[in-house]
Image: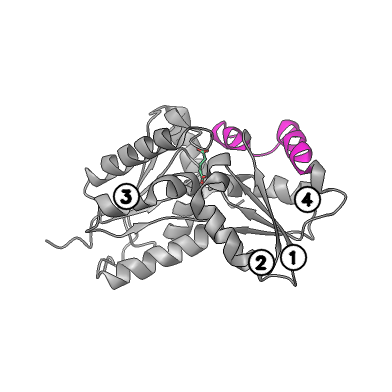
Amino acid sequence: MDKTQCPIGVFDSGVGGISVLRELVARMPNENYIFFGDSKNAPYGTKTLGEVQKLTCADAEYLVSQNVKALVVACNTATSAAINILRREYADMPVIGIEPALKPAVHAREYPRVLVMATPMTLREEKFHALMQKFETEADILPLPCPGLVEFVERGELDGAELERFLRELFAPYKEKPVDCVVLGCTHYPFVRGMIQKVLGSRVLVFDGGEGTARETQRRLKECGLCNPSGEKGKITLQNSLASEETERLGWFLLESHQ
Ligand code: DGL
């Protein structure tokens, strides 16, 4: 059966993964996509490992039941908790995960101070420790768990005084000795990038893993002969476990936003 016309399944604990979907569409506009956000159960990053593994497997199964040709785990938390389980379960299809974009940040300056913002689970899991170990001689790497930040994005609160206060408090320990680079290690954070940059100052370089994930997805599709040969614009479907009009509106707004 020709699977090239089948959609690419993309999922996240909520609307954050739309930052990855945006990069996928920019790179491969002719592909069809189904995005599933599990906003009903967000955030994942403060749950137990077992809970996140269970939810991640359910998200993937839901997309696979809709005949997707590949799975993109547009969630750092779900990737660190369950990518190996998913790769075992769906050994016959490309399963692409995301990880904090530490490499470009480390190489952006000479021995930089790099702040890695992510959920508590991403920073606790083995996958991140292995990644950090790879670069620890080249940079001063500072992991910063950010519980509570995902909720701002889920509420559609992408700027304003409360978000600014939250971030100022979060970054207060780095005021004395400023950081050079920030890695957005959670797919929700690119949507508050403007405020992060405002609070930290324009000198700080900001990195996220969305583009690299889109590039890797394209590489895997090519390798497996799964690229859609169509020259037409593909179809994008947004689904969410909350199934509310408000969440749907937020989803489309985020997909079209340029922050
Ligand atoms: N967007 C997710 C990530 O990339 C998870 C946020 C959460 O649900 O805690 O880590």
Q: Earlier in the sequence, mark 3 or mark 2?
A: 3
Q: Earlier in the sequence, mark 2 or mark 1?
A: 2
Q: Secondary structure at mark 3?
A: helix
Q: Which residue is mark 4?
A: 200
Q: Earlier in the sequence, mark 3 or mark 1?
A: 3
Q: CA distance from mark 2 to mark 1?
A: 6 Å
Q: In the image, which disc is placed on residue 46? A: none
Q: Secondary structure at mark 1?
A: loop
Residue projecting furthest to the right: 176
Q: CA distance from mark 3 to mark 1?
A: 35 Å
Q: Which residue is mark 2?
A: 106
Q: In the image, which disc is placed on residue 112? A: 1
Residue 35 locus on image (x, y percent): 37, 45
Please, what is the three-letter code of the amino acid marked with disc 1? Pro
Q: Indicate whether residue 44 is drawn in magenta.
A: no
Q: Circles 2 and 1: CB distance less than 8 Å? A: yes
Please, what is the three-letter code of the amino acid marked with disc 2? Val
Q: Residues within 10 Å of mark 4 (few under 14, many from 20)?
A: many
Identify the residue at horizontal 73%, vertical 31% (top origin): 162
Q: Is residue 242 visible?
A: yes
- Per the rendered image, the range of residues in magenta is 149-171
Main secondary structure type of the part rendered in magenta: helix
Q: In the image, which disc is placed on residue 86? A: 3
Q: Is residue 110 depicted above or below 28 in this figure?
A: below
Q: Quadrant of the N terminus?
A: bottom left
Q: Secondary structure at mark 4?
A: helix
Please, what is the three-letter code of the amino acid marked with disc 4? Leu
Identify the residue at horizontal 30%, vertical 72% (top origin): 223
Residue 41 locus on image (x, y percent): 44, 30
Q: Earlier in the sequence, mark 2 or mark 4?
A: 2
